[in-house]
Image: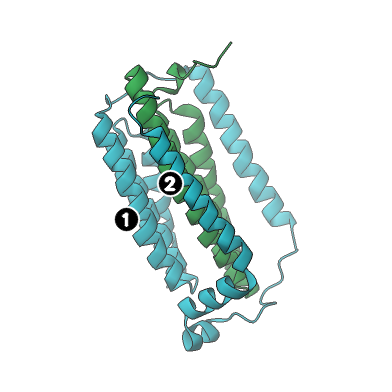
Chain colours: A cyan, B green
Amino acid sequence: METLFFTIVAAVAVLSSILVITCKNPINSALSLVMTFFCLATFYVMLDAPFMAAIQVIVYAGAIMVLIVFVIMLLNIRSETGKRSNHAVAISSIVAFFVLFETCYFLFRSTAAKEGMGPLTSSVVESVGHTELIGKAMYSQFLLPFEITSLLLLVAIIGAVVLSKKKI
Amino acid sequence: MLEKYLILSAILFSIGTLGVLIRRNAIVMFMCIELMLNAVNLTFIALSKHLGNIDGQVFVFFVMTVAAAEAAVGLALMIAFFKNRESIDVEDINMMKW
């Protein structure tokens, strides 16, 4: 049952991500990307990470994609801006296929990841709560990276404000 | 159990790579980069579940923050470029080319 569900959702995810790169109109690409994000959120739920699924839907599908769609509509882009030559497409396909082949090769060769070495299991997630587990890890073990992230966001805000000035 | 998630994430990552390489519209390239970041997130969460360790999910959190910052700055750059050139074709971004 779970495998069947996985197969269906995975097929939808792959199809919609292919639509992202083949659609002529950027708006259609953006909507297909939202579909992919929803499929990924489903996988996060299946992997016992409900908080991550919520963040995926709220932050990615909600905030970031709305920003992108907003910019596409603001710029009123023509449907298609020229095509790459056939040679470029062929070489790109070879590169992408090589990436896929290499990852699969190393995936089946590697034996490093032994199952269940850590304390996090489905029952722990169910009894303690996923949000609490994430919060505890983030505000104790990962406090310094968390603070650095806030610095990154500050820099991004300043950068966006500077870049959207009248004269640049 | 784990392999299917990793293979799916490899497929999504390759599709994202292909999109970055074959499209000329800067915003679509940007969306393909988001797709690649999401494929990596799926790997992190699948391995986090497999190893029983929460660290991978905290990393996903940081990846999402970086993606949000990237979206803000990248889209501001594209708007600035569009104001100057009336286009967001990456072939037109050649002011610093020699």
**Left or right relative to A137: residue A7:** left
- Residue A51 in percent (x, y) is at 43, 71
- Labels 1, 2: one chain: yes
Vertical comparison of A52 with A155: above or below: below
Q: Secondary structure at mark 1?
A: helix
**Left or right relative to A106: residue B66:** left
- Residue A17 in percent (x, y) is at 41, 45
**Looking at the image, which residue is at 61% across and 61% down?**
A145
> Label 1 belongs to which residue?
A62
* In the foreground, B19 or B27: B27
**Residue type marked 1:** Gly
Quadrant, the N terminus of chain A: bottom left
> Label 2 belongs to which residue?
A157
Is residue B38 visible in this depiction of the protein? no
Is residue A122 visible in this depiction of the protein? yes
**Looking at the image, which residue is at 51% across and 35% down?**
B18
* In the foreground, A90 or A84: A84
